Amino acid sequence: MKILLTNDDGIHAPGLWAAARALGAVGEVAVVAPDREQSGVGASMTLHAPLFVHQVPAEQYLAQFAPGEAMPPPVADAVPEPPPADVAADLPNAITAWAVQGTPADSCILALENLVTPKPDLVVSGINRGSNLGWDVIVSGTVGAAVQGFVRGYPTIAISVGSVTSPRFDVAAEIVASLARGLAAAPEVMPPYFLNVNVPSEPADKIAGVRVTRLGGRAYGESVRTEDSFGHKRYWIARNRPVLAGGAGSDIDAHKGNHVTVTPMGMAFSTTDERIAMVEGLLDGALGGFAAAAAS
């Protein structure tokens, strides 16, 4: 099995390398990730500038991110210490890595269209620092990268842990490896599986279980902070206001109950027949005269 691994926290993120180590026990892993933090950029792509890519030493990152180790400098090629001699020998499958001067979506596109050969069997995005629940998936770079795999026909997993300040990645790493094995053994379906997984940042014995959920509503709202800078006003937007509007069966409610949530995703931005009928009624009144004029 060959696995493409990407993220939005950047090539230096410990969650990425926790996933790489766990997935390396399942199959060959190609890591292609942004060269810096890219959270909150959604599915944005770089269309009006060239993209630069360079290969990075996977073994050094794996050694640096052994459990309990501190983070390296947040620069893609700044891992100064050579890896221990047994790091590569400890890996059952090859792990290669590239850093992309671009967005998470850019990273996934470059990987699938150019960098990774032969093509992977699975796309994984994460492990993200902080949850991606409910409507937050619209702005999530983790999910934005995963979308690029899904729309190209690859089974895809986006995985996150529910803490920004002190995330635990061990349980999430075990879960993503288990899901990868499950998808490898599952019959192929079209459209492919697209799973958005959120794991509480807790030890395994504190997790209540696993639930298959639907997306909830709004998880976090935005706040705006202003400051004066040399006679000009600057504005800072932050997503730090909990809303957590879930509802029964939602990922938000299940996550509140300390469950791992697995949400099947798709690209159904369309709507229901009932909503179409409502809008048709609205347009009969609002644009009826225009429609009559156009028909005559």
Image (spheres, rainbow, N blue to C red):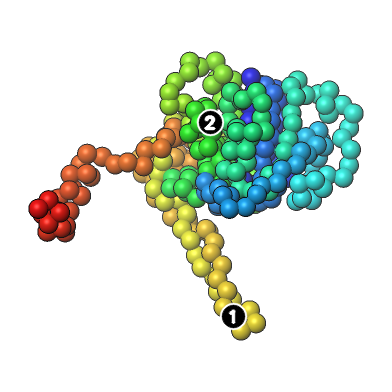
- For badge 2, the amino acid type reads Thr
Residue 145's label in the rendered image is none
Q: Secondary structure at mark 2?
A: strand
Q: Position of residue 92 (x, y in %)?
A: 75, 20
- For badge 1, the amino acid type reads His
Residue 156's label in the rendered image is 2
Residue at numbered disc 1: 232
Q: Nearer the viewer, residue 86 or 50?
A: 50
Q: Is residue 208 left or right of residue 59?
A: left
Question: Eyeballing the image, is 261 above or below 26?
Answer: below
- Which residue is found at the position 46% from the left and 58% from the top? 221
Instruction: Tell me how far mark 1 sits from mark 2, CA to CA.
Output: 45 Å
Q: On the image, which quarter does residue 206 sit in? A: top right
Q: Quadrant of the N terminus?
A: top right
Q: Secondary structure at mark 1?
A: strand
Q: Is residue 56 left or right of residue 190?
A: right
Residue 238 visible in this rendered orientation of the protein:
yes
